[in-house]
Image (cartoon, helix red, strand yellow):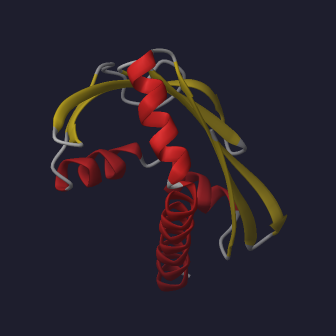
Amino acid sequence: MNFDLKEDVAAPIDVLWGEVTDFSSFERSILRRGADVERLDRNAEYGVGSAWDLSFSFRGKQRSARSEIENFDGPNEFRVESVSSGIEVSTVVELVALSRGRTRLSIAIEISAKTLSSRLLLQSMKLARGTLTNRLKQRLADFAKDVEERQQRNA
């Protein structure tokens, strides 16, 4: 199952790269939503090999996942691979400068199932694909709006 999302953001590519690679902010956001997150590497910088263990409740069961940055080519793209209970998720975030002050943010998410139970879960996600796509689009639009507001305040 694939999701492809695009959003044009009124911010320079370097500013947007700083926002999409602010993993500390994403860690805090995950914690606020009730999940646990632990960074596995101790490097000061984020890059290839940075990894996290996540623990969260989903559909009434406690689940865990491991995510790792597999590709980190700033300020153009990065790829995160995640594995959780037979489900593998590949997320590619790509930035393309449209002009000096405008950047296209593209996110491609590919989800695959490796076990029978994960295939059943993925099948139910496919039935709700429209709802999931709309939620993802709304979150991306909100993220872009926040980045643009911060960019205007700092300009």
- The correct choice, above or below, for 128 with respect to 52 in the image is below
User: On the image, which quarter does residue 66 sit in?
Assistant: top left
Most foreground residue, 14 or 31: 31
Side of 25 relative to 47 (left or right): left
Question: Does residue 103 appear to the left or right of 113 in the view shown?
Answer: right
Nearest the camera: 155 or 50?
Answer: 50
Quadrant where the C terminus sits is: bottom right
In terms of image quadrants, where is residue 62? top left
Residue most extreme to the right: 98
Report x, y in % for residue 71. 63, 26
Q: Residue at x 60, y 60 (%)?
A: 16
- Residue at the spot 51% in from the left edge and 38% down from the top edge: 123
Q: Is residue 119 above or below residue 123?
A: above
The location of residue 152, given as percent across then percent down, is 54, 84
Nearest the camera: 145 or 54? Answer: 54
* Residue 24 sits above or below residue 49 on the image: below
Q: Quadrant of residue 23?
A: top left
In the image: residue 21, left or right of residue 10: left
Residue 83: tell me if it is visible: no
Q: Is 95 on the left-hand or right-hand side of 131? A: right
Check the image and report above or below for 133 versus 69. below
**Could one spot residue 124 in this view of the protein?**
yes
| Residue 43 % position (x, y) | 37, 22
Residue in the picture at 49% in, 79% down: 154
Q: Quadrant of the N terminus?
A: top right
